[in-house]
Amino acid sequence: MNAARVGVVTFPGTLDDQDAARAVRLAGAEAVPLWHADHDLKGVDAVFLPGGFSYGDYLRCGAISRFSPLMDELIPAARAGLPVLGTCNGFQILCEAHLLPGALTRNEGLHYICRDQGIRVENNGTAWTADFETGQEITLPVKHGEGRYVADADTLAELEGSGRVVFRYVGGNPNGSLNDIAGITNEAGNIVGLMPHPEHAVEELTGAPSVDGRGFFTSILRKLVNA
């Protein structure tokens, strides 16, 4: 199991890379640091784009990160099947890179939201959700000012019709996301983006509301080991 290597990307302004690396290690994999200016993925088996405020969220959240040298390597690798998880700012970057459809915009109430949030697992068929049950409700922290998921009507219909909505907010929508969408996947199921932070819910020591975030990392580790 220790042979599985998960890259954790750091952009200027990334905040959650150390939390992400710790979550990967707690699951039993090796966390491999990837710097935004790197020109190779160091042979990793999967990649995690963690949260933060890359490039100060200038222009739009994730808009500059999308053009980092590392993304020139990650985009084709992800399209070829490399498992990729993006949380919060990482989700925004995946949308900016057109690896996932739609966009994340200002919260409906125009306020930064920081709270524990219930979400429901809608799809456990992705590389990152296999250890959950469809319909399972979990609790993860959210902390964002631009987390409202939006897409045109055709895109929403396609996501809903093909089961590509992976997570949906329950117990209140924190940001006004359309259809209560908290996370989505690509058609192949190897790329997942969500606004909540599983890396902050992996151990009781930190006072997390749950350890529900562990399922993301045990899921990908199981997939890599069994590949």
Image: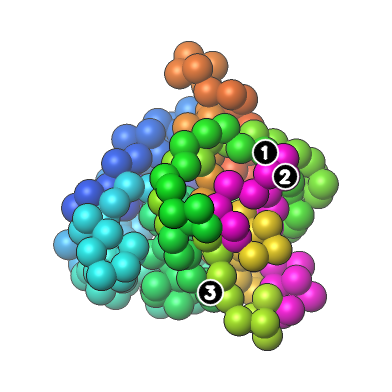
Q: Are marks 1 and 2 in contact (CB under 8 Å)?
A: yes
Q: Residues within 10 Å of mark 1 (few under 14, many from 20)?
A: many
Depth check: give the residue in front, 38 or 204.
Answer: 204
Asked whether residue 146 appears in the rendered view, the answer is: yes
Q: Where residue 85 is drawn, which disc sits there?
A: none
Q: Earlier in the sequence, mark 1 or mark 3?
A: 3
Q: Is residue 35 left or right of residue 135?
A: left
Q: Residue furthest bottom?
A: 154
User: Rounded to the nearest whole Å, what is the CA distance between mark 2 and mark 3?
Assistant: 21 Å
Q: Amino acid at mark 2?
A: Val
Place of residue 52 in the rendered image (x, y in percent of width and height, measured from the top left): 32, 47
Q: Residue at x 32, y 35 (%)?
A: 18
Please name the residue that numbered disc 2 is placed on: 170
Which span of residues is magenta-colored? Answer: 157-177
Q: Is 183 covered by the magenta stretch?
A: no
Please name the residue that numbered disc 1 is placed on: 118
Place of residue 58 in the rendered image (x, y in percent of width and height, measured from the top left): 23, 64
Q: Amino acid at mark 1?
A: Gly
Depth check: give the residue in front, 10 or 117.
Answer: 117
Please name the residue that numbered disc 3 is placed on: 102
Q: Amino acid at mark 3?
A: Gly
Q: Is 165 covered by the magenta stretch?
A: yes
Image quadrant where residue 163 sits: bottom right
Q: Residue at x 55, y 64 (%)?
A: 149
Secondary element at tag 2: strand
Q: Residue furthest front?
A: 109
